[in-house]
Amino acid sequence: MGAVAGARHAGATLTIDLGAIRANYRLLRGRLGGTACAAVVKADAYGLGAAVVAPALAAEGCRQFFVAHLDEALALRPLLPEAEVFVLNGLPAGAEVDCAAHRVTPVLNSLAQVDAWAAHSRRLDRALPAALQVDSGMSRLGLSDAEIDALAEDPRRLEGIGLRLVMSHLVCAERQDHLMNREQLRRFKAVRARLPKAPASLANSSGVFLGPDFHFDLARPGAALYGLAPVAGEANPMRPVVRLRGRIVQTRVIAAGTAVGYGASWQAAGPRRIATIAVGYADGYLRSLGNCATAFAGGTAVPLVGIVSMDTATFDVTDAPQAVEGGFLELIGPRNPIDALAGQAATIGYEILTSLGGRYARAYADAPQNERVTA
């Protein structure tokens, strides 16, 4: 890697490996056999930049993309002119015109949304594509049992809708032996049999690893594309995607008994050398990491001491003489993957990824056409 544009004064550099994202997509697609593989790029591609990530996946052959909000879909449409873009959160009231005009496929989550989309189809006098989500156990989005009953009794409510998918979402797929997986599969098959025939989608990232019974016609991986482990308790087969390095802005030697950080939650047991980096919870380096995270100075592990502040965090670098002002500590990388950092923060890798802040100097390595894109 060469110098990252914009990094001269930044408090940290965040490198995003598009080649790894594409490799992860190929691995997932390979496990699916003949099942199509979509990509979930909601929340700005889990914080990594959908405007760069989505075209890279399209170049890898991905033709279906899922986002959470309509505005996310509208932003991606010019970058993905030939792809199908689904909106997971459904059809917002009054958004029918924008959805149809920009060829966005809403995931219909209620009978009210079904009726609104069908009515707009009649106004335009043409079929409009949509996915239909059913609740198989998440109790979050999707048609309830009562709504499924009503739709099964009157399938004419779907007239004018080009049903692209019947879909649901797995609750416990990362735990392969969880009984909920088979129960959801049973429920989904039963519901699908009562609805008009259409392609089906159930598997998320972890669902891909549950096996062919869960694959159906289209899988919708998200987190695994970005390097997160898809199966709890097993080695991660995905390539790491992000590397975060925080700049050391000051070092100091402190005496035994000296406190570090807000609340004086950590005190030195003896003389220690402390490095302050220009990364804090305003950058998505979570406050819950205080006194429990680890970073690396080269190959040397250095503990975070004290509470993470808004703009800074402090590490004990007594055993890492290479950690000097102007240098960097690796906060996320091969030695400290996102899932490990998430464990230190008592959270999940999803939150770490989507919290990564806007003050980092960002670089996209191995971009399409062998270019490096900076932001």
Image (tube, helix red, strand yellow):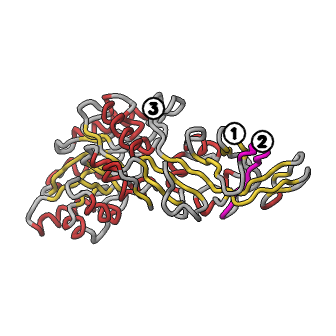
Which mark sits nearer the N-terminus, 2 or 1?
A: 1
Q: Are marks 2 and 1 in contact (CB under 8 Å)?
A: yes
Along the viewing direction, whichever of 233 and 26 lies nearer the viewer: 26
Looking at the image, residue 18 sits to the left or right of residue 6; the answer is left
The amino acid marked with disc number 3 is Pro
Q: Compared to 231, does 317 lie above or below?
A: below
x, y (%) of residue 268?
A: 86, 49
Q: Residues within 10 Å of mark 2 (few under 14, many from 20)?
A: few
Residue marked by disc 3: 237
x, y (%) of residue 319?
A: 77, 41
Bounds of the magenta segment: 311-322
Residue marked by disc 1: 300
Q: On residue 319, which mark appears? A: 2
Q: Is residue 1 visible?
A: yes
The amino acid marked with disc number 1 is Thr
Q: Residue at x 53, y 47 (%)?
A: 243
Q: Is residue 355 magenta?
A: no
Element assignment for label 3: loop
Q: Compared to 165, does 82 lie above or below?
A: below
Q: CA distance from mark 1 to mark 3?
A: 25 Å
Q: Are marks 1 and 3 in contact (CB under 8 Å)?
A: no
Q: Compared to 174, does 39 lie above or below?
A: below
